Structures are given as structure tokens and as C-alpha cells.
Amino acid sequence: MNPTVVVGCSQLVTLAGPPRPRIREEMRYLAVVENGAMWIENGRVVRTGTRAEIEPLITAETHVIDAKGCAVLPGFVDAHTHPVFGGNRADEFEKRAAGATYQEIAAASGGIRSTVRKTRDATEDSLQAAARRYEEWFLRGGTTTIEAKSGYGLTLDDELKLLRVIRRLNDTGPIRYVPTFLGAHEIPDEFRGRPADYVDLVLDEMLPAARHLAAYCDVFCEPGIFSIDQSRTILSRAKSLGYGLRLHADQLSLSGGAQLAAELGAATADHLERADAAGIAALASAAVQPVLLPASVYALGSNLYPDARAMIDAGLAIVLATDFNPGSSPTPSMAIVLSLASTHLRMSPAEAISAATINAAWSLGLGPETGSLEPGKRADFVIHDCADWREIGYFFGVEHPRAVYTGGVLAYSRA
Ligand code: NIG
Ligand code: FE
């Protein structure tokens, strides 16, 4: 492959910096090169600099990409999604508009369990086709890496089915998927009234069998779903099998999920809308990264957003993600998440970009690979249709990307 150069960047937003997640005021520094350019070889960034520094390297063999005065950023890393599911829940969207709550719908056998029924009925190929449609949405929004959870199968075979779909998506498309096993997402219908038996199934059969298909294990830790003790049992077993840990924590109630994540040395604690000062201090003591999901708060019609400012003040390396799923957060848009971060979490636009790129990459163990445009990293980058990167979160509801590249290869371009 001939060398590639990206020229004509009004701003090349590199996020170059120390090789670790960014905290406190580091999150406000994006290492922007005005009139920037980037040299790429074999799908990896070789050099970034000003136009004057890079353009003299161009020869007749160089493949030139002209950003035409637009801002160029690393692709977004969406570190919390549930993208493989059958059907959708537009019917529940309508019910919630009429006043029903997410919890009421779940208690009446809707919610996650209704998606589980549709997902079990779906073939692997039809799930794959549906997920490809969502993948296209992610790509058009400038996302190049996705953490993807199972969790709508809830039998051994159906959970493995979802993880195989995620593997196929990763192997056959432009986006990189990081697979997470979420067998403990809900108690399925056939185990109602005997949750301990379902926990045993997760422990004894699912966790060992899913290991070769998943890098992380996650649990929906919530009173009435999986208690702190059940979550601890599942995640401890997962840890002993070599999974990294993530945890849906303190979303709908404050139950000590943050402390559990710290106790187990989880990579992330996700949601945290109800986390208190003690929970935040626990996360800080164990360097657990919070994954904040403001689109799910918005889509549930709630105003209880997580306390991002307290988390930044405590030195936590915040991550922002969509939580894309058919119930609480039906959006693949990281741009909308950036907007919500600045309007409702009071994160500066720069803090939000750090959380959506470099910090997200580190939370998935991919810090050395992606999330910034630095020598040696994969050339995952996006040409946005604006000259000033701050417009990405500011003009919301707009798909800014004009072109998206993964590993230096064009993955999407606007017609
Ligand atoms: O992250 N809280 C649990 N899981 C998802 C919701 C999944 C669904 O409603 O289908 C979440 O919000
Ligand atoms: Fe989630």
C-alpha cells in the first residue's frame, strides 16, 4: 500500500499526550494542530504536523486525501453498546410517551425480556443483517470502534449466537468490535421466581463457554435484577476465567455498584446516575473508569444525569458512550452524546471529546491502538464537515462526518 497523506485540515485534533487515560485538566487539552496534516503508512499514523512540515514529503506515489478545510479527528470509540437484538421497541416508546415508566413496562414482561423473546426467535443471519444496518449508522456518525454486549439471548445457545454475530461483524466490516458477555442482563421468563438457578447457569455453563468469544463480562447490577452479592459472585468467577470486568452500576437505584466495581478492579463502572460521593471516592481509589451514558437519561425522559463534574474533580478518567440499545437509549450518535455532555453534564466540549476518544479507547484496553492520532496507532480518523471541531457537539442532530477511515482505508463517505 502506498503511503497516504491527509492535507487541508483546518484543525488536526490529535489528542496526543501521555500514554494513559486523561484526567482533570488533561481532558481539556486536545493537542490541535492548526493547518495540520498527517502521514500514514500501512494503515498506521507515522507522523502528524503542520502542512508546512508534512507536504514536502509528498511524492508521485503518495495517495493524497484532501480534507478541504475541515476538522479531522480520531474516530469515536463507543465503549458501551447493545447492538445485536431482534425487533425493536417502538411500541414501548409510544407507551412511555403516554406516561408508562421504563420500570413499569419491564415489570409487565416488556423491556429487556420482550427483546429477549424476539432475539431468541431470530436467526443468526437476520440478527447480523439488523446489526449491519445499525453499524452503518455508527459509521455515518464517525464511530470507528464499538464495545458490543450480548445479553438478549439469556440461554447458553442464544448468548453464544449473539457473540458469534459480534465476531462476524468484527471480522467482515470496517468497524472494530470489542465483545462483552452480558448473560446477567435480566432474569429470563423461564427462571422467574428462581433467580439463583439462573445465576448458577451463568456461572457453570455460560461463563466458561463464552470465554473464547468475549473479552469482558458485564452484569446489570440493580436491586430486583442482579443484587450486589449475585453480581459479585458472577464477576469474581468471570475474573478468575480471565475476563475483564464492566458493570451497569447505580443506574436506577443507589446500591453500591460503584464500590463493587472498585472492589473487583473492574475496568469500568457504567451509568452511575445515582452514584454518591462515597461511590465516586471508591472508583477513584481503584482507578475504575466511569462510562457515562447521558443519551439513556435523555431517552428515558429523566433529568437525573450523573455528576460528571464531581467525577472529574475526583481525578476519574471519564468515558462517554451511547448505550445504544432498543429500550433505554435507541441512538448510535456520539455527536448527540457530546451535546448532552456539554448541556447536561457541564463537561467542556474538549473534555467531552477526550472522553469519547482516548479515554474510551483505554477503557477497552485499546489505548495503544486507537483513540488518538499519534505515531504507531491505527489511522482511524474522521473528516467532519466543519472548520472548528467544537461545532460537532454544538450543532446537534446533524451528522457531521464527510468521510470516515478505519486503518487508513475509506469506510464511509457522504454521497
Ligand atoms: O444499559 N440497564 C440495562 N441495560 C440497558 C437497557 C437495555 C434495554 O432496555 O433493552 C441499559 O440501559
Ligand atoms: Fe447498557
Image (cartoon, grey):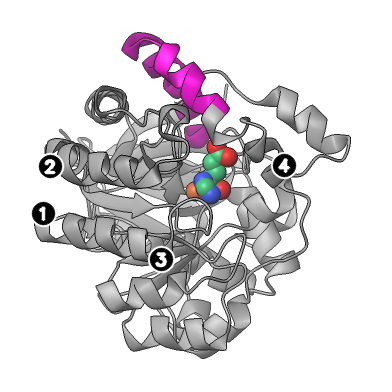
Disc with the residue nearer the chain's start (3 vs 1):
3
The reply to whether the residue tagged 3 has its Cβ within 8 angstroms of ligand 1 is no
Q: Which residues are magenta?
A: 114-141
Asked if one can make out residue 391 in the rendered structure from this viewpoint, the answer is no
Q: CA distance from mark 1 to mark 4?
A: 36 Å
Residue 208 x/y as whole percent: 12, 42
Residue holding disc 4: 104
Mark 3 or 1: in front is 3
Q: CA distance from mark 3 to mark 4?
A: 22 Å
Residue nearer the viewer, 303 or 40: 303
Q: Check disc 3 and give the amino acid type.
A: Ile
Q: Quadrant of residue 128?
A: top left
The mark tally for this picture is 4
Q: Is 318 above or below relative to 120?
A: below
Residue holding disc 1: 241
Residue 405 x/y as whole percent: 37, 38
| Quarter of the C terminus within the rendering | top right
